[in-house]
Amino acid sequence: MTNTTITLHDSERQACEIWTRVMGYHRPVSSFNTGKKGEFHERKFFVERHSGQAPAAHTA
């Protein structure tokens, strides 16, 4: 088994459209205004624990 690296030129790549849920419906991030795009990129992701469960140790 060999390790090969695949290299693509920008002209060979396909753009990926990112959608997110806003106010109960899904919209593409590309349709956001400048302020909303900035807000989207500042979001922090978290995993909510079940009630009664001890807090998990945070590793960074």
Image (cartoon, rainbow, N blue to C red):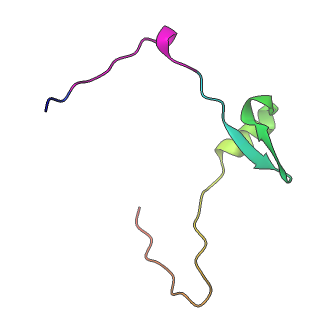
Relative to 22, is 60 on the left or the right? left
For this orientation, the residue located farthest to the bottom is 52
Residue at the spot 51% in from the left edge and 82% down from the top edge: 55
Q: Position of residue 33 (x, y in %)?
A: 82, 32
Task: Kindly indicate the quadrant of the structure image that contains residue 57.
Answer: bottom left
Which residue is pictured at 70% across the width and 44% down the height?
40
Q: Does the magenta run of residues contain 13?
A: yes
Spot the residue most to the top: 11
Tell me where residue 19 sits by quadrant.
Answer: top right
Residue found farthest to the front: 1
- The magenta segment is 4-14
Give percent across and percent down for residue 4: 22, 25
Say how many tags the image has.
0
- Location of the C terminus by quadrant is bottom left
Question: Relative to 57, is 60 above or below?
Answer: above
Q: Main secondary structure of the magenta part?
A: loop
Q: Residue at x 60, y 28 (%)?
A: 16
Q: Position of residue 52 (x, y in %)?
A: 59, 91
Residue 26, relative to residue 28: is it above or below? below
Viewed as shown, does residue 33 lie left or right of 9?
A: right
**6 or 59, which lies in front?**
6
Give the image quarter of residue 32.
Answer: top right
Magenta-span inclusion, residue 49: no
Q: Is residue 1 above or below residue 43?
A: above
Direction from residue 2 to residue 40 in the image, left or right: right
Residue shown at 62%/56% (left/top)?
Answer: 44
User: If the image is split into quadrants, where does the N terminus sit?
Assistant: top left
